[in-house]
Image: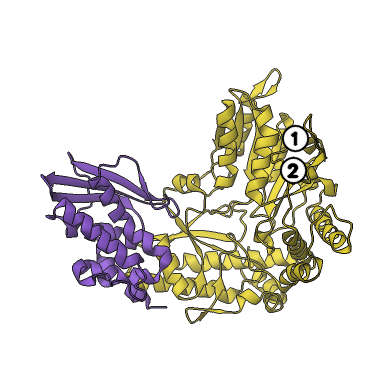
Chain colours: A purple, B yellow
Amino acid sequence: MSDLRELYQEVILDHNKSPRNFRELPGADRHAHGDNPLCGDVVTVYVGLDDETLREVTFQGSGCAISQASASMMTDAVRGKSVGEARELAETFRSLLTEDGGPGAEAPDAAALGKLAVFTGVKEYPMRVKCATLPWHTLAAALEHKQEIVSTEA
Amino acid sequence: MSLATPKAVAHAYDVERIRGEFPGLHQEVHGHPLVYLDNAATTQKPRAVIDAVERFYLRDTSNIHRGVHTLAERATATYEGARRTVARFVGAPAAEEVVFTRGTTEAINLVARSFARPRLAPGDEVLVTWMEHHANIVPWQIVCGEAGAAVRALPIDERGVLDLAALDEALDRGRARDGNRIKIVAVGHVSNALGTVNPVREIVERAHARGVPVLVDGAQAVPHMPVDVAALGCDFYAFSSHKVFGPSGIGVLWGRSEHLAGMPPMLGGGDMIRSVSFEGTTYADPPKRFEAGTPNIEGAAGFAAALDFLSGLDRESVLRHEEALLAHADEELAKIPGVTRIGTAPDRAAIVSFSVEGIHPHDVGTILDGRGVAIRAGHHCAQPVMRRFGVPATARASFALYNTHGEVEALAAAVRGAQKVFGV
């Protein structure tokens, strides 16, 4: 197996301990609630929009270090991006963690992820991938105006 | 109790000989010897169980209760023999009171559907406890929802001990001229999340005094302690094979014959009928009435082998060994700053739920796995318990007869290692 330090990198532990943008956003233009019924992780993502730009993104919730750090770093990463760019980043993040990269597969662009590349270690822990992707699914749902709760177990 | 005594007894208990019977224990995980402490989820299988399943496949593969050929006779003998083994194992007065199901969950659903549902009317109640597994909550919610009845949960205290006064109160409040509005009490023998051993005999006495039947979810009790359904006095007792060292996919509902006799089938099909015509079908007597379709025959063979394996051990010394492991685990975890145990009832089976300050249980689970230590992290299918204790999840180490004191120490060392990784 890969080293546990690959999974629990310093930056992940730091965001877990002191999550950024961890608050409700009063008057949020969009918000969505996500949960992972298998493990009980819950997250609510709030988005404040200026036209098509994500002016402010915050979250609340509880869960493991991977889910908390992923949510925290996501809120930093998508602030100032357009809705389209945020969706694209969510998709890149998801594919980086879930796709095999078998023969002929297009390698996901780790460089496009910037700081978020610290989550590539999660791929080695299939049981934990959903912890990292839950906040991103929830953000995507918020941007799509979905009212229902997003679940990792559809 | 003094710690010296159980350790001395544990020394006399030949755990290495027992470990030798379980091939699955002897492997490495991530370069460390496997320390399997997830026994409340499922148990490893002894050689005798593996052999019994293999023997069935190699020699006896056939369907049961039909066919007059030799293999069919052998398969039927295996399956019905397993039923008698189960009956003996739990002190059932008759083998016909043993219904094979897919497991505890299906057994409870069968009682909810076929015993409780016809008795439930609007305003009636089913009593459960705050410490139940979802399998002993959701089936009751489904049938109560249909009937306009309600599921009421009895409170537990901060140690995880059931409030028996609340049981009395609920049972008395339910009294009506034509019986009791409480139609059944459904209680776990041992809590999977807290380890609490419930005083089943007392619960049964109190319920029966008001004419209310009792179902016991025994999934977590049977692997740890001798169970005698006649002595407990309950009406139904459910448990699963895979938690007592047998194959998964098979379990048992034991029910008093007078109850089973009046219950309609839950599933229709072959093997559960007396005669079928388009004018009308008559059902077989219990237990076959509740066993539609070809059952898990090889599972029954393995299940019986598991119970025979347990019966071949001195159950009293198994219990002492597990008590010593539990005391040792409590002691080791208490020494670690930041570790809080959840579930501290005086009477507990060898299950320890705990939280580590600053580390989510899933992270504890992943880090422990990196050291070969398998535990469960999560809500343990007991979300009301988690809410009661104000935690989203816990880490849980659950012991079996093959665990060792060295493994308790490996658990404690791995928890300290997790704290180091997280810098807490």
Name which residue type carries label 1.
Met
Closest to the observer, A112 or A41: A112
Q: What element does badge 2 sit on?
A: helix
Residue A139 at least partly seen: yes
- Location of residue B156 (image quadrant): top right
Mark pair 2, 1: CA separation: 9 Å
- All told, the count of numbered labels is 2
The image position of residue A1, as x and y in percent, is 42, 78
The amino acid at mark 2 is Phe
Against B326, residue B219 (above or below) is above
Return the disc, 2 or 1, that comes first in the chain's sequence: 1
Residue A92 left/right relative to B13: left
**Which residue is more in the foreground, B318 or B306?**
B306
Q: Which mark is residue B263?
A: 1
Badge 2 sits on which subunit?
B
Badge 2 crowding class, 10 Å Cα cut-off, few under 14, some 14 to 19, many 20 or more, is many
| Tag 2 residue | B290
Residue at screen point 67% across, 50% down: B218
Residue in front for this viewpoint, A101 or B221: A101
Q: Nearer the viewer, mark 2 or mark 1?
A: 2
Q: Are marks 2 and 1 in contact (CB under 8 Å)?
A: yes
The residue at the far top in this view is B177
Mark 2 on the same chain as mark 1 = yes
Residue B132 visible in the picture: no
Q: Chain of mark 1?
A: B
